[in-house]
Image (tube, grey):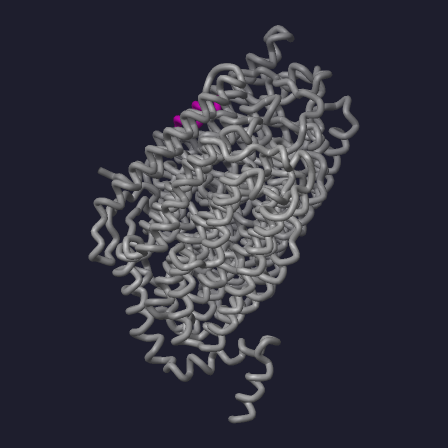
Amino acid sequence: MPILSLMILLPVAAALMLLTLPGADAERASRARVVALATTLVEFALGIWLWASFDQTTAAFQFSENLPLFAPFLNWSLGIDGIALMLIELSVFLMPLCVLASWVAVKKRVPEYMAAFLLMESLMIGTFAARDIFLFYLFFEGGLIPMFLIIGIWGGARRIYASYKFFLYTLLGSVLMLVAMLWMVDVAGSSDIGVLSRTDFPKNAQFWLFLAFFASFAVKMPMWPVHTWLPDAHVEAPTAGSVILAGVLLKLGGYGFIRFSLPMFPDASAQLIWLVFGLSMVAVVYTSLVALVQQDMKKLIAYSSVAHMAFVTGGLFALNTQGIEGAMVMMLSHGLVSGALFLCVGVIYDRLHTREIGRYGGLADTMPKYALVLLFFTMASVGLPATSGFVAEFLVLLGMYQTSTWATFVLTTGIILGAAYMLWLYARVAYGKAAGDDTRAMPDLNAREIAILAPIIFAVLWMGIYPKSFQDPMKPAIAAVVARLEGRALATVPTDMTLSAVLPALKSPANADKALAQEKLH
Amino acid sequence: MHPIFTSIAVAGPETVITLGSLAALMLGTFTAKHRALTVTSLFAVAILALAGFTLLDAPAGTTRAFDGLYVADDFSAFLKVIILAASAASVLLALPWLKESGTGRFEYPVLMLLATLGLTIMVSANDLLTLYVGLELAALPSYVLAAFHRQDNRSAEAGLKYFVLGALASGILLYGVTLIYGFSGSTQLDTIASVVGGQTERSLGLLFGIVFILSGLAFKVSAVPFHMWTPDVYEGAPTPVAAFFSAAPKAAALGLMARVLVVAFPGNIAADWQQILIFIAIASMVLGAVAAVAQTNIKRLLAYSSIANIGFALVGLTPGTPAGVSALLFYTAVYVAMTLGSFLVVLQLRRPDGSPVENMADFAGLSKTQPKLAAALAIFMFSLAGIPPLLGFWPKFAVFQAAVASGLIALALIGFIASVVAAFYYLRLIKIMYFDEPGVPLATEGSAVNGAMIAACALFCSPIGMLAISPLAAATTRAAAALFPN
């Protein structure tokens, strides 16, 4: 059974159905909600089935399909390895929750809204399942259209500015990647990702190709300094839009690095390690400090996302098993935790219609259940042991330590800063006195909201206590990537050289003295 | 049989349209005045369809006629299908507009037939003189069409502007022809090629000839720096005429350009015209993208959009390879559908007082008042912006693939960055339609034929249209191969 095609096309079919629903507005809206929920649940069931029948022992692409539908430009070529599998699981897990989260919050143009989300789901699954590099690009870029509409139509006050910024920023990054793709396919003679991952491109070409892909993935990720679209997009997007943005769309960048940059340009990856580490270090410290001063809850979480994504890039470019595995767990964990945090913000936003931190307070008294849930996700975001965040951060730092101690040192401060801004946020929202009577009158979580948040709590704990279930499927695929890197990257860049390659990046203000001392020694 | 009859048989579509246009003139004259326009228009569409059918009957391979002045091959056949289809659509889409505007004269379809005849001759021209005859035959009716709305000052101005500048361009082109004739001794493309191929030294005269010919042709395709007339003419000319200008003549002139450059000037001299084309392509892409940002009139916006699109299409021609020409043809086919679709939506909409819609602000909230038309226009805009998975992405993909394969990476980079700038103004229209609150509620023209054509174009440009990639690419590859006999 072509299960991947089914998973991609089912939401499209449902979306088309939603757009052509007959009846009055109210009737259409309620039908649209039910259809969307049913579709996403079926997708989730298919996702579970996919996981259950996945062979965890091989790095080869599974569930392969290949149809020369669009020859000579591209093939409908699908297949997943463990990395793609886990990200697909994340997408199909979050989707029903997004639909539920929008159940009452979205009131205008409900069928169109749900259709946009279903299209989003199909494009995201397609991105992870594509085996043809141009098919990947098609899904990767196609995701811009529904997200543009979601932010622009259902977003907040500055939605138009945010939607433009989101669209044009990411598009500009991607076209550079497309030129690189065209060149690679011309040289390699095949657009199959598997073939391209085994092709050895000339070293000087790898440098430019890496930078072109980097332009696209760094924007998607997003990495400092091209992260500025993210806070705007998050603040203006509706709650479910933020969840998808943080939960899945941000993962496209990391997925791109691990699927393309590392195995296809191993030499350039080793050579440019200082660039990635440098940007990651700045991102962790800078965005954490920025997060500290935010007055808007969503903006704060958005900046924390940038910091967490810096852990992902740091882990990936540790170029070893622990680092990459940690980065993958970080992506899954961040998808769950920051998605859940946005949902938590959505819960109180639905009641008070403001995201300003100062307007809340004392929720531990008035909304005890909510305060408990928020506390849990705050702790998960900080990386408390037994939550998924701990596993992720620990593995990333472990991996990075072998490549660059200094970069690890700087990233570790991010954990402290992360605890600072998250706990302070929690203190201002949950403790103290309620800011007003309307704040005090807010009702606690209802059954629907608990139903949305409970599965995420469960998943976060599972990933924190027994991460093996999530790591095992990815292990062979990650081993393949590492083998690709070791085969050449380490041969050309010995460990001590890797360290010295990191040195220029260490000249960030925090380490200027140390770097100076090192130079004096030489 | 006398050779002239064989030749006439080879030039099937042209023969049919020639006779058909004369018959249409008679038909229009002798039909009651209130029915004349409808009857003649339908007759013209039938003639164009018949001309299309003669293509089916054409022998495979390359056939020359009229002593080598005319050539019928896969290349010309492919472009003729596009031209005939676009012209037929242009005749049909004008009907409601003409009836309403009070200028519903039956000469309109007749002029369209004559212009189409010129266009078909252009793509079959194997001689610089045939080329000139075809070009002028297409241009003269076009001048009249631009000024068809006689009562309107803007229309008259558009006609006059188009005529004066067009005549200048024709003159430049003709001067180029004389130079090439002087330095190569022939006007026939194959003969020029063999003379040019035999030369070891670069001939300055030939180079000048190429520059002049390219200037003339750049005017016809409205490429920068010969684009100035386009926004004014599109804005002033009746909207159906602007729709016609943006589709069939562009396809013909692009085809003509490809044939002249590839067939007559291969080998060493190709590097020379390549430089010119790179300049024209970059200038068109960038100017088309940047200048459109400030437009408020939808017709002017579409004019700049067509300038930018011509730039993208020319990227396909720059490498001078079969893959490049194939990409150019692919671009043309998809572009014609996108631009005709956009104009159709504009034509289909009416302000409450019955006047046509031109101001972009009028589209505010269209997604609420006319959701279907808004969706169609959104598809055309995303497609013109070149966002996958819409079909409009793949022509850009094809031309840049050809460019990158020939090592023109910088050209591809500039082109893609220009396309991001262009995306900004396409998005603006979508923003107006989907994000803004409705202003004046727009009505539809209610023409079922136009509605069906919009639906067909939208379906073609939507992701479903990607299924057309394979057959279309096969056809363009075959057509492009006709220009490269070896």
Q: Quadrant of residue A404?
A: bottom left
Counting every numbered tag in the picture gives 0
Q: Is residue A295 left or right of residue B42?
A: right
Q: Is residue A122 left or right of residue B189?
A: left
Q: Is residue A504 above or below residue A119?
A: below
Q: Is residue B225 above or below residue B298?
A: below
Q: Is residue A461 visible?
A: yes
Q: Is residue A103 left or right of residue B357?
A: left
**Magenta range:** B47-54
Whether the magenta-drawn stretch holds residue B52 is answered as: yes
Q: Residue at x 40, y 47 (%)?
A: B480
Q: Quadrant of residue A468?
A: bottom left
Q: Is residue A100 left or right of residue B27?
A: left
In percent of width and height, residue A35 lies at 40, 26
In percent of width and height, residue A69 lies at 31, 41
- Give the camera-side residue of A433 and A165: A433
Q: Quadrant of residue B36?
A: top right
Give the quarter of the figure containing the N terminus of chain A. top left
- Give the camera-side residue of A244 and A199: A244
In percent of width and height, residue A326 lies at 38, 62
Q: Residue at x 62, y 6 (%)?
A: B32
Q: Residue at x 67, y 20 (%)?
A: B441
- Give the camera-side residue of B21 and B101: B101
In percent of width and height, residue B369 lies at 62, 21
| Farthest residue, direction right | B153
Whether the magenta-drawn stretch holds residue A375 is answered as: no
Q: Residue at x 49, y 15 (%)?
A: A23
